[in-house]
Image: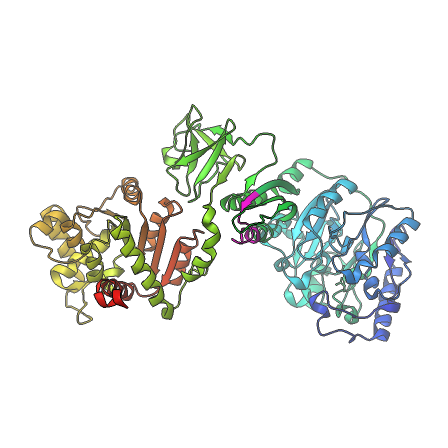
Amino acid sequence: MTAQLNYLMCAPDHYDVDYVINPWMEGNVHKSSRDRAVEQWQKLYGVLKGLVNVELVTPEKGWPDMVFTANAGLVLGDKAVLSRFLHKERQGEEPYFKAWFESKGFTVFELPKDLPFEGAGDALFDRSGGWLWAGYGFRSELDAHPYLAKWLDVEVLSLRLIDNRFYHLDTCFCPLTGGYLLYYPPAFDSYSNRLIEMRVPADKRIAIEEADAVNFACNAVNVDRNVVMNKISDRLKQRITNAGFTVIETPLTEFLKAGGAAKCLTLRTIEVPIAAESSDQAIEQGGVEARIVELTGHLLDSGIINRALDLVTDNGGSFQVLEFNLGEQRQSTSLARIRISAPSHDLMETIMGELIEIGAVLQDRDTSDANLEPVLQDGVAPDDFYVSTIYPTDACVDGEWIRCTNQRMDAAIAISPDGKTATCKLLRDLVVGDRVVVGYDGVRTVRKPEARDTAKKEEFSFMGAGVSSERRVELVVEQIAWELRQIRDRGGKLVVSCGPVVVHTGGAPHLAYLIREGYVQSMLGGNAIAVHDMEQSSMGTSLGVDLKRGISVKGGHRHHLKVINSVRRYGSIHKAVEAGFVKTGVMYECVKNDIPFVLAGSIRDDGPLPDTVMDLLEAQRLYSEQIRNADMILMLSSMLHSIGVGNMTPAGVKMVCVDINPAVVTKLSDRGSVESVGVVTDVGLFLSLLVQQLKKLDSPVAVAA
Ligand code: ARG
C-alpha cells in the first residue's frame, strides 16, 4: 500500500440514474441495478484499499451522482478548489463536498457564480511535468482555468473537448506515472491535440481506439505502476503492460450507465505540488489570454452578436458579456462589451481576426492606436502584420481613425510617413521604410449600417449556403437579369470573368449578346476562353468538338492551335477581328464594342495569343484596374480567374459566381460578403436563361404584365 496517498470515495447508497445530463444516461434512467452497483463499487473499493488509503464522504439522499467524487473539487497541497457544477442536478452536492474539505483542513476556493468547473473530473495533473491539464467545452468553462492557475500556482494547459460522450477530461485522458499518457485523441480539437503532442513525447503517448474509449479505458485510477480500470481490450492491456504497468480490471458497468467509471468514483486528495520544469515553455505554449472588444450596430437584428459569440466558442475560446445596451427603437443600434478568452495566444489571434472582420473593435488598452512596425526588407512585411479583408477598414494613428484606400483582401496596411493616409499594399509592393499595421489593436472594419436588412436579402439570393438548387436557378436568374438591367441603364459597370467552359457549354453566343447589348463593361479571362471562342467562330468547334452537332471533328484537337497561329500572324485579337478572321463571338463583340479585356496567362497556356499577358504581376495589376468601380462581377466557370478577382475586390461589389462544381461556388461565396450569390449550374444554361430573361424585360408584354 502506498500509505501516503489518500483517495476519497462515496458509497453508492443513493446511486441511481435519475436524470440525463450526459449521453450515457440517455435510455438508462432507473435502469441500473443498485445491488450490482454496490457490488461493483465494493470491488473497486477493495482494490484501491489494497493500494492506498481510502476515505469516505457520507452519501446524501437526493444526490445520486455524489458517488462520483472526482467531481467534488480539485486538490493541490492543502488547497481545494470546490466544483461549481454546470447542471442544477448536481449543484446540491457542492455544500457536502465543501464541508468535507473543510473538515479535513483544506483551504477551500470557490469560483464566481455561473463559472462552472467540475473539479478533478476536468483537471488532471501531469505525473511528470508539474502542470495541470484542464478540460473545457462541456462542463467546465475556459474562464475558470486562470483561477486554477492563480490559486494553485500552477501552469494550466487548456484542452478543448469536442465529443459529448467524453464530456469530462477524465473520460478520455489519463496521465500515468513516468510521464505516460493514456488518451483518446478524437475527443479533442486539433489545437489541443497539438498541445498534447508538444508536451508528451510520442513514445509516452498511448492513444487508444474508440472501442476502448467507450468502455472508459481512460477513466483509470493510476497508483504508481498500477492502473485500475473497467474491462478493456486485450490489445490495449498489452500495450499498457508493455509500458511497465500492471492493469487491474474491475467491472464498473453499472456506473457506465451514468457516464462514469473507476477514476470518476475517486478523488485523489493528496496531490503534491511539483515544480514546473521550464516557465519559458509555459509562456510559449499555453496560458489563457483575455481581451476586451466592443461591437456596435444592429447586433440582434442582423444576428451579428450570435455570429460573434459563436465564432469565439467555435475557435475554442470563451466569453463574458460585460455590458449589453440594447437599442430601443428599430433604428437604434446596440452596444456590447465582451471579454474574450482563448486558451493560447495563437487562438486569440485567430479569434480577433474574425471578430474584427465582423466589426468588433479592441477596447482594452489606454490608447486606441494601431501598432506600427517598419518594413525592413523590400517586399516583406513584419511578422504579425494585419492581413486586410474585403471590408472598408480604418486604422487608428495618433488617435485618428483613417480609412484605408485600395481596399482588398490579403494585403498589409501601410501608413504614410506623416501618418495621414493608410493603404492596402500587396507584400511585393512594400518597401523599406513603410510602416505597417501589426496585430489587431487600432484596426476596425466598417459595416454598412443598413446591414440589418441583409439577412432577408441573403436568404433570397441563397447566399450563406452559397449554393442553389436547379429549381431555384431560374429565380436567381430573374433577379440577376433585373440587376443587370439596372446597372446598364444607370451607366454602371459589370465585369465578367470567365473560363473556356463558357464556350464548351454553348454559352459564347449568349455572352456575346450581353456584350453587344451593352451589359458588359469589362471582360477578364485567360488565354483559353479567347482561343476557344475564336476557334468556335472561325472553325465551328471548341476544343475540337462541333458544338452544333455535339461530336468531335476529325483532327479537331489541333484546331485551337491553328487559331492561335493565325491570330499570332495577325498580331493581335483586334487585328484578327478587323481583318475579318473572327466574325462572331465574345472576343469579336469586345473588339467591336470597345470593351476592354484582359487575358491573364498561366503555365498551361498554348501559344499564347499575342494579347495574353504572361507577366503575372502585370496581369494582376491590369485585372485590378478593370475591377475598380465595378458594381457587379459575374464569375463564369473559372475558378482560377474568379478567385484572383475575388481577392482584389472590396466588399460592396456584388459577385455572382456560376459553376457546375458546388465546391467552387462555395469557395467564392464564402468570402463572407453578403453581396455574393452562388449559383450551381451549367454555365451555358445559366447564360441562356439570363439572356431569355433580359429579352423578356425588353418585350412590351413583360412590361404590361
Ligand atoms: N452522471 C455524472 C455526470 O454526468 C457522471 C460523472 C462522471 N464523473 C467524471 N469525473 N467523469 O456528471
| Depth check, front residue: 483 or 110 | 483
| Depth check, front residue: 529 or 249 | 529
Is residue 286 shown left or right of residue 444? Answer: right
Could you tell me which residue is drawn at 46 percent across and 59 percent down?
A: 456
Is residue 34 shown left or right of residue 237? Answer: right
Image quadrant, ligand 1:
bottom right
Query: In the image, residue 489 lies at what x, y percent?
Result: 25, 52
Q: Is residue 116 magenta?
A: no
Instruction: Identify whether 403 is placed above or below 245.
Output: above
| Depth check, front residue: 195 or 516 | 516
- Please state, as top left, top right, bottom left or bottom right, where the C terminus lies in the image: bottom left
Query: In the image, residue 307 lies at what x, y percent?
Result: 55, 53
- Please state, as top left, top right, bottom left or bottom right, where the N terminus lies in the image: bottom right
Instruction: Identify whether 517 is placed above or below 702.
Output: above
Extreme right residue here? Answer: 103
Residue 371 at least partly seen: yes
Residue 52 at least partly seen: no
Query: In the image, residue 85 lies at what x, y percent?
Result: 77, 56
Q: Give the quadrant of residue 340.
A: top right
Extreme left residue here? Answer: 579
Instruction: Identify whether 571 is placed above or below 428.
Output: below
Query: In the image, residue 7 lies at what x, y percent?
Result: 86, 55
| Applied colour scheme | rainbow
Could you tell me which residue is drawn at 11 percent across and 45 percent down?
A: 571
Q: Give the quadrant of residue 551.
A: bottom left
Q: Read off the magenta span.
A: 295-307
Q: Is residue 303 magenta?
A: yes
Q: How many marks?
A: 0
